[in-house]
Image (tube, coloured by chain):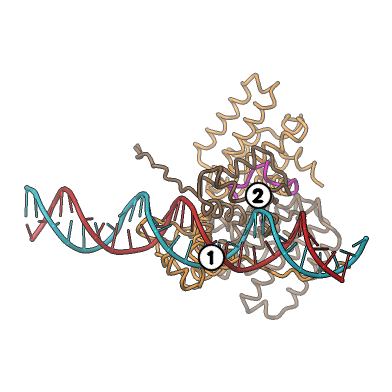
Chain colours: A brown, B orange, C red, D cyan
Amino acid sequence: MSSKIKPIKSVSLVEQVEQRILEFLKENRFKSGDSLPGEIELAENLGVSRNIVRESLSRLRMLGVVESKKRKGMFIAEPDILSGIERIMDPDLLGEEAMQHIFELRLVLEVGMSELLFIRKKDSDIVKLQEIVDREANDPLCKTDLQTRLAYEIEFHSYLYKMSGNGTLNRFQSMLLPVFHFMMQQESKAAAEPKRGSISHNDLVETLRNGTAYEFRENMRNHLTPHFSKLS
Amino acid sequence: MSSKIKPIKSVSLVEQVEQRILEFLKENRFKSGDSLPGEIELAENLGVSRNIVRESLSRLRMLGVVESKKRKGMFIAEPDILSGIERIMDPDLLGEEAMQHIFELRLVLEVGMSELLFIRKKDSDIVKLQEIVDREANDPLCKTDLQTRLAYEIEFHSYLYKMSGNGTLNRFQSMLLPVFHFMMQQESKAAAEPKRGSISHNDLVETLRNGTAYEFRENMRNHLTPHFSKLS
DNA sequence: TTAATTTTATATGTAGGACATATTTTAATA
DNA sequence: TATTAAAATATGTCCTACATATAAAATTAA
């Protein structure tokens, strides 16, 4: 029975203007490359100071929605959906819950990615992965040093994202790395230690070479078991 | 042999200040709730005008890194990794490639999500899903109207994200909806038409009730076949 | 003394003007 | 005609002033 008090929406002018400009762009079907009205014109039409407009545009510029050149003015660009995330994806900034969500997200992505890998894998990719696995197997440090193991773990899985052929997915994973790294060190060392009977990187490469997307998916799920078993 | 001329990075002051402030927060291990130096103090220490500082802070405010109250000043908040994306996740703003990436991302998520569903499903969830499926089956409009079919499709899959227990994942899907909706209408109607022999929503619910995460994963993959088969 | 009220101080929010800077356009010159 | 110089213009940066909300201090009432 939460009888909430009405949250008075005292949205700042900047936020309102930001929304209005975005609406304006959507409604008028602005295409990439089109030029926007100048700051002063926007300010006048909106009835606010140029400062407010500039703050709003600064935000949109950060998101990649617009770009600006000195005398030319401002024009539409294709927004980068990850540019916002990129700035704050840092264990020192994120809360515990967000970190957990992101860690789970990575598990979900790697299991679900299988189909893309099989659609887009190239022979050269298999060669590259095998090279990583071989290097890992022959590195004596791997037995003793957790950091080394982690480095190989990351290198291997990062390449899988690259193989997915989905640039957004790939970039997303690369900015997930700090969080991933942090969470792995939080978990007990067991996580990075290959367990008897579980799926190794080598097994995954073999499945990628001669197996099916179906098999790979289950093998990856198996490979990630130590992480999944920590969830609740 | 593209002999590019070095692109002199004339990063705007705002961008530089934004980075410096973020670094400052990370290095000094600012915790959620801590208060920041005031705008004028920041401006003086950084050697820039208050305007520049305000634009930078406006960006950080948008990302949820900081919040500000009138006389209290500014303080750290837990950033919302999705707030940036939320604003620009719109078919009218995104480019074709980004849309494709996002659509694929959804497929990946739904297949990979299986494990989370089985870890966190509750009896009430199954009941709710069954209710959706029954309603869909008894709706005569479903046979003829594409929009109706799409609505049920979205309602069903949206609830799965909700079940995942991962708030970030859930919010992400909800802002994916416009893109999803758009892409589905681009695809031929066949996509939304249940094919003979393929996995239906009802089958998925049944698997969720009495099956395993393993089975559900493959059934979901099967259910999404029409979309996967369009990839290359 | 304590509680309620008013006042004051302060940091953010908004406005508007001024000049710097880069670059396109135009004009002037060789 | 080609080259060079000047002007025009939109963004980038700085400055000052004032509005506004509110925490903190001071005042008054009980």
Residue type pointed to by label 2 = Gly
| Residue B86 or residue C14, whichever sits in front | C14
Q: Which residue is mark 2?
A: B112
List x then y, in percent, for residue B163: 54, 43
Q: Secondary structure at mark 1?
A: loop
- Write down the residue under mark 1: A91
Residue A200 appearing in the image: no
User: Whole-Å distance between the Cαs marked 2 and 1?
Assistant: 24 Å
| Circle 1: residue type | Pro
Per the rendered image, the range of residues in magenta is: B85-97
Q: Residues within 10 Å of mark 2 (few under 14, many from 20)?
A: many
Q: For numbered disc 2, what is the local secondary structure?
A: helix
Front position in the image: B232 or A131: B232
Q: Tell me what residue is drawn at x 61 percent, y 75 percent.
A: A146
User: In this orientation, which residue lies closer to the viewer: B55 or A216?
Assistant: B55
The relative height of residue B55 versus residue A142 in the rendered view (above or below) is above
Q: Chain of mark 1?
A: A
Residue drawn at point x = 67 percent, y = 45 percent: B93
Which quadrant holds residue A131?
Answer: bottom right
- Residue A90, horizontal then vertical, whole percent: 55, 64
